[in-house]
Image (spheres, rainbow, N blue to C red):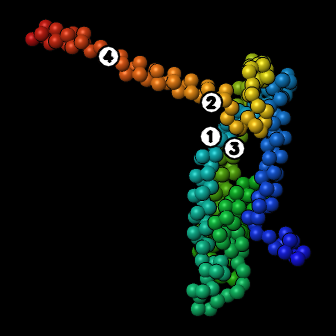
Amino acid sequence: MYEDHNRFCWEQSDPLNVAEGLFAIGNVISFTRLFYLFAANEFLGPLQISLARMIADITKFIVVFLVALVAFMVGLHNLYWYYPKKERVPTSFHPHNGTTTVEKYFGIWVVSFRTVFWSLFGRGEYNVVEFSIFKNDFTETVGYLIFGVYNIVTVIVLLNMLIAMMSRSFEIIQEEADTEWKFARSKLYMEYIKEGSTLPIPFNIIPTPKAVCKLLKSVCVLFRIHNKNADTPLNIGPKKEMYSSNSAATV
């Protein structure tokens, strides 16, 4: 009975595993809420604003970065798709039970993504594209070429471009640090001064009669504006007369 309740026998999608994962993410988000209060401090406020601007730069840059990452990941995976055991053993006349290096790093899609992603931070080795039991120098050379170009494009070009963008954002904030900080501090003050929710967290998720009334009023206002615009006649008469007079004058 104890083994049935042991985590070694659990499914990976067990509700308790999912709950613990979500709880860990919630802890990270809860503690990062402390950054929101930094705007009240004269020294931490500008840093908090600079961090927010840098996150915006990263979000814009991530689109370009994902295109490059996916392109090289797909190329390397398709180059080595044959060499994992589950692919080569059933189709080989002389099966080899040995494990290749590329099988461990580019055997499946998830592992390929993990390899190219962590290589950005210097966590990868240059020999991940080598074979150990196959004598296929051409494929190995192509793998070296693709992996080398990937590191040049992402590590040397794109990452340095991202650093330059974040440095520019930081310099812009520092030029007007006092104004930016006072504006952010005023927004923080207004969050506590303005009219808040009727119910505390987490009951504010449930719609209250007050919220329903506001929603109905907004819908009514929108319908009134729409009906008013629909009833307004189009004033095209003078334009027609002007066009006719201009045509007659031309003739």
* Marks 4,1: beta carbons within 8 A: no
Quickly name the residue at label 3.
Answer: 160
> Which dot marks residue 212?
2
Q: Give percent across and percent down for residue 52.
A: 73, 33
**Which element type, helix, strand or loop, lies under badge 3?**
helix
| Placement of 143 over or under 57, stated as above or below | below
| Chain-order first, disc 4 or disc 1 | 1
Q: Which amino acid does label 4 sit on?
A: Pro
Q: Quadrant of residue 194?
A: top right
**Which element type, helix, strand or loop, lies under badge 2?**
helix
| Placement of 209 over or under 136, stated as above or below | above
* Marks 3,1: beta carbons within 8 A: no
Q: How far apart are marks 4 and 2 (CA)?
A: 34 Å
> Which dot marks residue 60?
1
Residue sitting at x 81%, y 51%:
23
Is residue 1 toward the left or the right of residue 153 in the image?
A: right
Between marks 3 and 1 in the image, the one whose residue lies nearer the viewer: 1
| Chain-order first, disc 1 or disc 2 | 1
Mark 2 is surrounded, within 10 Å at the Cα level, by few (under 14), some (14 to 19) or many (20 or more) other residues, namely few
Q: Distance between the residues labelled 3 and 1?
A: 15 Å
Quadrant in the picture for the N terminus: bottom right
Is residue 226 toward the left or the right of residue 219 in the image?
A: left
Q: Give percent across and percent down for residue 163.
A: 71, 40
